[in-house]
Amino acid sequence: METVSTKRRILEKALTLFSEKGFEAVSVGQIAKEVGIKAPSLYKHYKSKQDIFDAIMDEMAVRYRQQTASMQINGVEAKKDIDIYTGISEEQLIQMGKDLFLYFLHDEYVCKFRKLLTIEQYHSKELADLYARQYADDPLSYQRMLFGFLSGAGIFKQENVKTMALHFYAPIYLLLTMCDCQPNREAESLEMLEQHIRQFSRLYGKTGGMRG
């Protein structure tokens, strides 16, 4: 039990340090000191700083799967979510949007990891590529496929799905980054998110909006 506890504390302290100072600026010795152990003891749990980083990524994936499972969606493979979205009402879509937004805003791992990549995108090409994949390429790819399926099912108009995905996702990520900088704007951002989803539904819905 102690081993599990120590491994978890290493991840938590490392992620906090990474989010405050950046990945490259933090040493294994600093992580060990924050945990309250010696560096050689840390290596019994993780073979390197990169190994810690990879474990943080794995933990984030687990948390995301738990969140999407609680919402009864896959969240990664759009084809598996098509049945959910073809039968969803606008109000349900808004609630799902808010639930995901709050998850990304408040989950400890997700929030700190986003801050880490925001710092490191200017210092590391590898982490800049990860930032682009994590916060642009992957979500846009998922939404392009989803909107393609919904257009084919007659839920949305036949429009350029790349543009549709950008129209949907970009304002949401902007609101998220705004809340990162100014947490007191969370309520305002949630209201703007709801208005955004309603307007998107009116613009692209086949009958001027999703069903009520």
Image: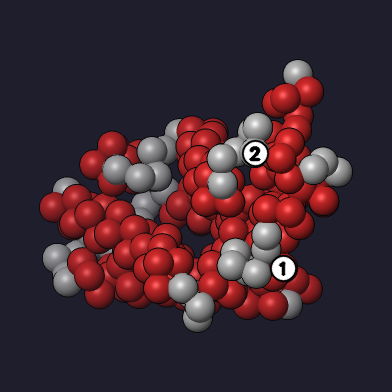
Contact (CB < 8 A) between labels 1 and 2? no
56 relative position to 124: left or right: right
Q: Which quadrant holds residue 186?
A: bottom right
Please tell me which residue is depicted at 54% across the width and 72% down the height of the picture: 120
Please tell me which residue is depicted at 52% across the width and 51% down the height of the picture: 50
The residue beneath circle 2 is 43
The reply to whether residue 201 is visible in this rendering is no
Q: For the residues marked 1 and 2, what is the alpha-carbon distance in whole angstroms?
A: 23 Å
Q: Position of residue 89 (x, y in %)?
A: 42, 48
Q: Which quadrant holds residue 42?
A: top right
Q: Is tag 1's residue or tag 2's residue first in the polypeptide sequence?
A: 1
Crowd tier of the residue under label 2, counting other residues whose Cα lies within 10 Å: few below 14, some 14–19, many 20 or above: some
Please tell me which residue is depicted at 19% across the width and 57% down the height of the picture: 148
Please tell me which residue is depicted at 72% across the width and 25% down the height of the picture: 3
Residue most extreme to the bottom: 122
Crowd tier of the residue under label 1, counting other residues whose Cα lies within 10 Å: few below 14, some 14–19, many 20 or above: some
